[in-house]
Image: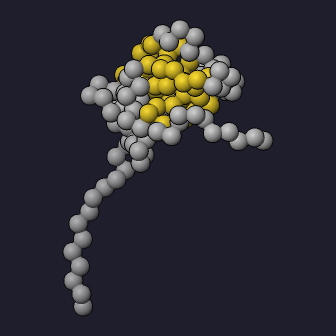
Amino acid sequence: MKTTEVPASEASVGATLSPDGRYIAAAPVEGQKLMIYDVAAQKWSELAKQNVNAIVWSLDSQYVYFDTQSNADPVIYRVRVSDKKLETVASLKSLRRVILPFWAWMGLTPDGSPLLMRDTGTQEVYALDFEAP
């Protein structure tokens, strides 16, 4: 196996290789756009200008799904690689979502439906008064 550094990727997060190995999708650290790297052409280009959180490829490598968790009205988008057509997949406004450190996880079912972790409020706060004997 050969390891090669991807040019101009130093300030990128969430890098994800497409299932067919042709592309890498990532977001700059500030998360204000979705970038795609064409492995054969060795070139980055902008795929979408949106806030970007979790990044997931469709199984056929035709779409990149991502969410905008940090927006006031968070949604899941998908963008078609061939023509950069952006589509809204689902609103996340009423979803109380589990947020992991620095990133919220998202997955896809085989048919392209989003998978998310819902926060069911398992964290509880207690007060404890201790009196030493």
Q: In the image, 55: left or right of 97?
A: right
Q: Residue at x 30, y 29 (%)?
A: 71
Q: In the image, 38: left or right of 122?
A: right
Which sits in the foreground, 102 or 133?
102
The structure's colour scheme is secondary structure
Above or below for 14 versus 127: above
Residue 102 in the image, given as x and y percentages of width and height = 41, 44
Residue 63 in the image, given as x and y percentages of width and height = 56, 18
Q: Which quarter shows the C terminus? A: bottom left
Q: In the image, 15: left or right of 60?
A: left
Q: Residue at x 44, y 13 (%)?
A: 87
- In which image quadrant can residue 21 be found? top right
Residue 85 in the image, given as x and y percentages of width and height = 48, 10
The answer, for residue 11, to whether it is visible in the render is yes
Residue 56 in the image, given as x and y percentages of width and height = 54, 29
Number of marks: 0
Q: Residue furthest right?
A: 1
Which sits in the foreground, 102 or 108?
102
The answer, for residue 118, to whether it is visible in the render is no
Which sits in the foreground, 101 or 3?
3
Q: Which quarter shows the N terminus? A: top right
Above or below for 121 versus 105: below
Q: In the image, 128: left or right of 79?
A: left
Q: Residue at x 49, y 25 (%)?
A: 35
Q: Residue at x 63, y 25 (%)?
A: 42
